[in-house]
Amino acid sequence: MTRLRQKFIRSLLHPLLYGCITGAICGAAVALFTVCAKIVLGFTFGLYENGSVALTAVCLVTLALLCCMLTAVVQTLCPSAKGSGIPMAEGCARGVLRIKWLRTLAALIAGSLLAFLSGLPLGSEGPSVGMGSMIGEGLGKAAKKPVEFRRYLITGGASAGLAAAFNAPLTGICFAFEETHRRFSPYILASSLSAVILAVTVSQGMFYGFAHIPYLNSLGIASGFCVLPFLKPTTPDGTELFTLCAVALGAGLCCAALGTAFNRLIAIFGKLFDKIHNSVLRLLPAFLLTAVCGLLLHLSVGSGEASLEHSYNGIAMWLVFAVLALRFITTTLASGSGATGGLFLPMIAIGGLFGILFTELMEKCGLDPAFMPNVTMLCVCAFFAASVRAPITAIALSVELTGSFTNLLPCVIAVTIATVITDFTKTAPLYEHMLEKLQRQTPIPPSAKNIVTVGRVFDDSPIAFKRVRNILWPYNSLVTELLRNGEELVPDGETVLMPGDIITIHAERVDPELFYSQICEYISAKPNV
């Protein structure tokens, strides 16, 4: 075995080991958080079911106002807890954001539970991703690991949080590549794979124990649970598969339009609410409108899986349309206002509700009603792909939410169509837009400038024997020159950095002191400002 391969294998062991530790902690934390979220959501959903009683209605509006004020306090103390935890996790993993992990972790939990208590149409999976990333950051700091290594742990923690929340390990791994970093690296694979495996193992073990408590079991807490157990796809024969593929084309087209409208409405609400500097006033419309809509139609509140199941089990189509319209408005309003909570489950609910309506239309055109779960799932994944622009994650999600490969080919068609068409509309992917907004809200230090740093790679440097593309360089930096044995080379992503190499790194709009402290963890550097 060559020295290069030995170094490569050894360099993978650290992310694997720490990924396991991160995953185990994340699995336990997300399991406890999921149980708390289920209890709160079940309590709130039950209150809104009895909202026709005058006293209950008054209590619900009062509760919404109280939750609004408490959420404002939480977000004032910790602004990084605004919105879904996913853009924040992505920003930390990419090195864009630097936040206080413990305060953010506590604020995410508190803000999310307040949102669930008031009935906001937000989910627990976004905060679970944020929690996982903060646990990874905290573990890395406790172990006194360098910045680059901590970013691998943040990635592993984020993937573990999503996998544990959905019981979807493949989705968690795909999310790390396609959404968090938007590139492949063996080190990202090592940290996310080990974290996801341990997180799902630990969380499912805890859910197995919780399932023996009758009340928790009645809320759907059980080992091996899936988010949409009622969507069991029907296996088509040859002709029926061809028909489903044709239906998938229509579903992809319609969901592309729905996803574009969803993203743009969130952006519009976000711009409007950014003009309101008082936190209570900024959050108040979302909390009040959710309470009013919930009193009119209780299926419009909560994260969405209960609403989707009730609608799927047979209610009038006009009522399904009403639930879809109310959830579409309140979800985009809540997200635009910056309320703490995830959008995965709400998007699944919106896509599923639209899928029920689309199936009804297809049945009038001759589709067998037995394929209702197939078409509903097609719309769920196509809408998700159109909004987030993560087609591989959407396809993996379709398999893991239903526990079946039956719908795979039609799902690939619907997701591809939705992604391509939404790209043509030039609508920004949902989480990318949110991350850019977070970046704009982060003040640029007055000392920020463009700098050039020159440094030597030593045998014990963390980047030695690694390809340039596999290294998580500091944000806004690029390796532009390489000198090896007196010979100048033009480095690219495939270039392997060897001991003795002298590299030149250009960085734009960075704080020189902070950047130098970071880059010294990669190489023995000398800044030329």
Image (cartoon, rainbow, N blue to C red):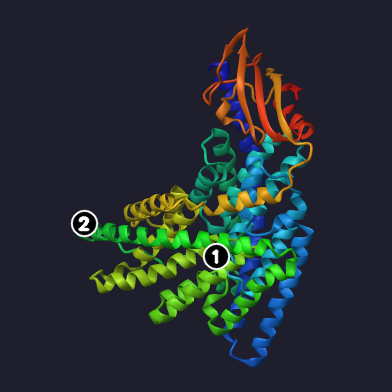
Q: Residue furthest left?
A: 239
- The answer for how far apart the CA atoms under marks 2 and 1 are is 36 Å
Q: Is residue 157 visible?
A: no
Is 397 left, or right, of 363 in this rendering? right
The amino acid pointed to by label 1 is: Ala
The amino acid pointed to by label 2 is: Gly
- First along the sequence among labels 2 and 1: 1
- Where residue 398 appears, as percent x and y from the top left, is 42, 56
Q: Is residue 514 above or below residue 37?
A: above
Is 266 left, or right, of 374 in this rendering? right
Q: Is residue 472 above or below residue 214?
A: above
Q: Residue furthest bottom?
A: 54
- Where residue 182 appears, as percent x and y from the top left, is 52, 41
Q: The C terminus is located in which quarter?
A: top right
Q: Name the residue carrying label 1.
A: 222
- Where residue 19 appears, as percent x and y from the top left, is 63, 41
Q: Identify which residue is drawn at 43% across, 67% down.
A: 352
Is 70 left, or right, of 194 in this rendering? right
Local crowd size for mark 2, using a 10 Å CA cut-off: few (<14), some (14–19), many (≥20): few
Q: Is residue 60 above or below residue 260?
A: below
Q: Identify which residue is drawn at 70% across, 51% down.
A: 441
Q: How many marks?
A: 2
Which structural element holds mark 2? helix
Residue 238 disc label: 2
Q: Residue furthest top?
A: 486
- Mark nearer the viewer, 2 or 1: 2
